[in-house]
Amino acid sequence: MPDIIKADGTVEPWRGEKLEESLLRAGASESVAARIRETIEASLAPSEESREIYRRAFSMLRSQTRTAAARYSLRRALFEFGPTGHPFEDFVSELFKSEGWTVEARRLIPGKCVSHEVDVYASRGDECLAAELKYHNDPGYKTDVKVALYVKARMDDIWAAEGRKEGPRVDKGFLITNTKFTTQAVEYAKCSGLNLLGWSYPRESSLYDRIIASGLYPITALTQLKKSEKRLLVDQGFVTANLVRENRNKLREIAIPPERIGSIVAEIETLSSGA
């Protein structure tokens, strides 16, 4: 098997089992996952790019099951939120709400030295957290230790001001991103007490895991929508599939015919149910 070029430019040996595992994780049957792996392995070119392998695997999976294809495309779907980070911030806010948190987006919190606008302030029971979100639409980018240092400094300034009447309580500080973290960023966060939430971190409770558990999917993951339609909806604040299902008249407003609206809503309901 030849080497492949990953999104970050690094080269690694092809591992077919890794592709098969990701397909199974998305909900593909064992036979479908094995057939897609075999088809791709039979046509691998030397130094092929991982994004091209993803494109072919996604296309084959979509022809078999659109719901599994939507789950398989989740990481790419978050990249489609760009170019600004506001849709990602709104999506994370909706994700926390679905987990029972009361959320305020872009809240101003006084620090000891200066005030800080945190992207997400959330409370649930006796727990309160403040989160800084870093969004990137480059699949090869990794959030590094410089970003973790910056966020921790902001949280330290907020904690240094606690006790003042005008400031809300913050128990935990978070750095949340749609990308992966560098090893050094993870090491620093563990040592300093900063909480991280990224695409594949922490293990067992990553951003991917929480999206799947909640059944709350980005609208950009829907396979029944065209890219131009997704862009129109995102620009109007409809960042989750559930928001579209609850406001399906919005689909009519962007000139989607009734028969397609039925298919789109059916896909949302199947995704949300975890089927």
Image (spheres, rainbow, N blue to C red):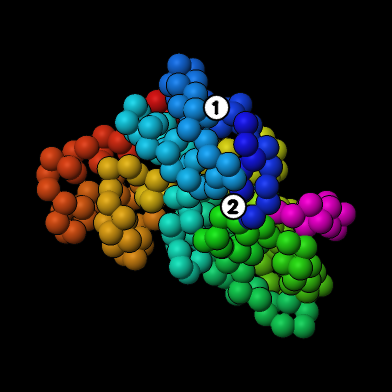
At 45% from the left and 21% from the top, the residue drawn is: 35
Q: Position of residue 3 (x, y in %)?
A: 64, 40
Q: Residue pushed farthest front?
A: 46
The image shows residue 134, relative to residue 167, as above or below, that is above
Magenta stretch bounds: 181-194
Helix, strand or loop under label 2: loop
Helix, strand or loop under label 1: helix
241 in the magenta segment: no
- Between 146 and 91, the residue placed more toward the observer is 146
The image shows residue 232, relative to residue 262, as above or below, that is below
Q: How many marks?
A: 2
Pointers 1 and 2 in contact (C-beta within 8 Å)? no
185 in the magenta segment: yes
Specify whether residue 166 is in view: no
Say which residue label 1 marks. 20
Q: Position of residue 222 (x, y in %)?
A: 34, 44
Quarter of the view holding residue 55: top left
Which quadrant is the N terminus positioned in?
top right
Say which residue label 2 marks. 7
At 68% from the left and 37% from the top, the residue drawn is: 13
The first of marks 1 and 2 along the sequence is: 2
Which quadrant is the C terminus positioned in?
top left
What kind of residue is marked 1? Glu
At 19% from the left and 43% from the top, the residue drawn is: 261
